[in-house]
Amino acid sequence: MSQSYSISLDLAHTAAERVGSHGLDASYFENLPHRVRGFRARLNLERGQGKHSYLALPHDQDALETVLRAAAPRMGHFDDLVVLGIGGSSLGLWALCRALSPLGGAGVCVHVVDNTDPLLFADIAGRISLKRTLFVAVSKSGSTLETVLALGFFAGKLRAAQLKLADHLMVVTDPEKGPLKKFADEHELEALSIPPGVGGRFSVLTAAGLLPAALAGLDIGTLMEGAERAERACRECALEQDWPARLGLVATDLCRDKGKRGLVFMPYSSRLAAVADWLVQLWDESLGKGRRLDQTAVEAGQTAIRAVGATDQHAQLQLFLEGPNDKFTLFARVERPEPDLPLGDFEWEAFDAGFVRGKTLSQVLNAQQRGTAQALAERQRPNATLSLPALSPRVLGELLLGLELATTYAGFAWAVDAYDQPAVELGKRISRRMLGG
Ligand code: PA5
């Protein structure tokens, strides 16, 4: 039997019959399966040519076992885990840790140093006991300035406390090259690899995300099973159920043809807030390009915006409902959160909230999501909803790989290279010159 996704995408509120001229017409949706089939064929062909390497990760049992073997002897020996990394080397692991926050397990308290802000360094240094802290420096290139500064600062602290680096510092980097790999070899630090073909923002399912997650006590085996399900589904599922391909196409066409220059990603889940941060980087850095693959000029891309429901109903929703109609909102809803909490007996009526009597918190949260989606549609603002059966490691693995696929497909639709970031070097070079470098 062919594999299907457990996550589904409801595109009803992107149709012109719901949102008028801001939506896509019936013929668009009739043609969509045909376009999805074409994109899938291209993906398969290019995978055969060695591209899109992140899709091989869920099947890499050796890599998973390497991470588990590296984490096991350190479990229970540390109270704090401090990850030194930025961009793809911090957002993914943070998304994993926030979504699956370990409850009562062998987990440690996770901190991420992802800025050159002295107050961040000082806050974390002030909160940890070095003897009981494990540091993991994550950098694909091994030369990212922010990460190198954090490494230098905390390695200095370990040395000053006469603690052996190898006992307190691990590294995740390129297996062959880069200054971080060299540093690890020189100091006999355990170094895990980010496969050379996998770019930073697609590295959440490599040791970059998995090692910190395992050290935090999360179930990375089940996470990878979910990712594997998504990888199989992307080849096997019915075209109508291929939510990553449909999302990549619809988001791009709403941007290009209907002026929806922003993609609001609004999960109704506090635990998925960091997945929204992760998606912002993935979508913006992958799709925001000035050249197509054929080198013709383009202003490609759609600005991803993070929002969290219901929290940001009280912050951003007014803008989304009445401000410029230039956004496409993608909601995510967890159908059966565990634990769900019944709303007990209280004077609800006195607060004009008698309607919640006998309900659970998730029933209220999900009604808020549906209400917001409906309100946007009534204001002719296209929106779609990802429906997650639960918020488990398995579903998270499927979600992350699915969103990576959606980004790849959006890259196809824009005809850009989703895996490079040629423009970000300029600001780095100017700052370096300002510091005399
Ligand atoms: O997606 C990317 O490649 C970047 O955003 C990187 O993740 C980021 O610049 C950090 O790079 P590195 O992992 O080399 O330190």
Image (cartoon, rainbow, N blue to C red):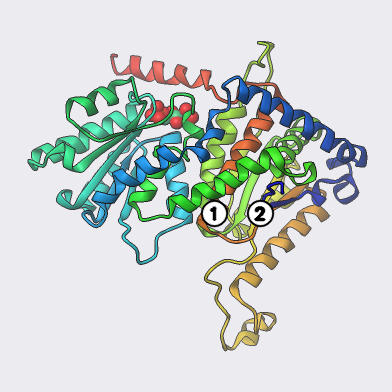
For the view shown, which residue lies furthest in the left direction?
162
* Mark drawn on residue 394: 1
Q: Amino acid at mark 2?
A: Ser
Q: Is residue 59 left or right of residue 300?
A: left
Secondary element at image label 2: loop
- The C terminus lies in quadrant: top left
Q: Is residue 256 left or right of residue 287?
A: right
Secondary element at image label 1: helix
* Mark drawn on residue 41: none
| Residue at screen point 11% across, 37% down | 159
Q: Nearer the viewer, residue 355 or 12?
A: 12
For label 2, the crowd category at 10 Å Cα-Cα, with few meaning under 14, some 14 to 19 and many 20 or more, is: some
Asked if the residue under mark 1 is in contact with the one under mark 2, i.e. CB atoms within 8 Å, the reply is yes
Q: Is 144 situated above or below 332?
A: above
Q: Nearer the viewer, residue 9 or 127?
A: 9
Quadrant of the rendered image containing residue 325? top right
Residue at which label 2 appears:
6
Q: Position of residue 269 (x, y in %)?
A: 56, 59
Q: Position of residue 267 (x, y in %)?
A: 61, 54
Quadrant of the rendered image containing residue 151? top left
Q: Is residue 141 left or right of residue 410?
A: left
Quadrant of the rendered image containing residue 280? top right
- Residue 306 seen anywhere in this rendered image of the structure: no
Q: Amino acid at mark 1?
A: Arg
Q: Is 44 situated above or below 393?
A: above
| Residue at screen point 33% across, 23% down | 143
Q: Is residue 344 left or right of residue 387?
A: left
Ligand 1's image quarter is: top left
